[in-house]
Image (cartoon, helix red, strand yellow):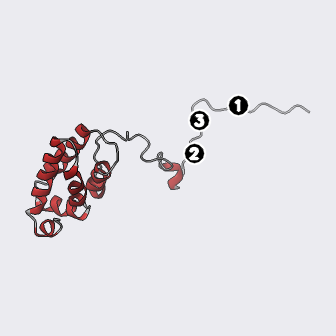
Amino acid sequence: MAVPAVQHMQGYKRHITSEFLKDRYPYLEDITGHLKPDDVSMAFGERMFPRLVEQLTTPGMAPENLCEALRTICDLCANQENKCQAIASDVVAAATNLLNHEHIPVRRDAARVIGSLALLIGGGALLP
């Protein structure tokens, strides 16, 4: 006995959805893979200053990139809330370590960052 062929409807496509996070989130395994180690980049929200501190403490970073990261921190510290976040993220310690850098622009920008954060009571207490 012959099995009749199943006729598929032309407008029908099967679309399977899942509510599990592993199916809905595309970058689960490598969330920082697109970031270049020698580029200065910012994160959003709580990771804004820790990301910049990671870049300041990276050994072998080019002096131009260090200056760019320090200028970014200085520009972001225009209000008291961002200064508090920067102090909590150990920006003062990272900038203090750069005061011994061999390039003068890096030392100058590190001093600007420390001077900006020292105006806050909590930042002045962290000065060496």
Q: Amino acid at mark 3?
A: Tyr
Query: Horizontally, is 51 left or right of 70 in the view?
Result: right
Mark linked to residue 12: 3
| Residue drawn 57% across the image and 45% down it | 16
How far across and how far down the image is residue 58, in percent? 34, 48
Q: Secondary structure at mark 1?
A: loop
Location of mark 1 (residue)? 7
Query: Horizontally, is 98 left or right of 21 in the view?
Result: left
Location of mark 2 (residue)? 16
Marks 3 and 1, how far apart at CA: 11 Å
Mark linked to residue 110: none
Disc 3: CA contacts within 10 A as few (<14), some (14-19) or many (>=20): few
Q: Are marks 2 and 3 in contact (CB under 8 Å)?
A: no
| Residue drawn 24% across the image and 60% down it | 93
Task: Pick whichever, 102 or 23, lies toward us.
Answer: 102
Q: Residue furthest right?
A: 1
Marks 2 and 3, how far apart at CA: 13 Å
Q: Amino acid at mark 1?
A: Gln
Q: Residue furthest left?
A: 119
Q: Secondary structure at mark 3?
A: loop
Image quadrant for the C terminus? bottom left
Task: Pick whichever, 47 or 103, lies toward us.
Answer: 103
| Location of residue 77 (image quadrant) | bottom left
| Residue drawn 46% across the image and 46% down it | 27
| Residue drawn 81% across the image and 32% down it | 4
Tell which tag, 2 or 3, sits nearer the viewer.
2
Disc 2: CA contacts within 10 A as few (<14), some (14-19) or many (>=20): few
Disc 1: CA contacts within 10 A as few (<14), some (14-19) or many (>=20): few
Image quadrant for the N terminus? top right
Query: Horizontally, is 59 left or right of 126 in the view?
Result: right
Task: Pick whichever, 26 or 84, lies toward us.
Answer: 84
How far across and how far down the image is residue 63, in percent? 24, 39
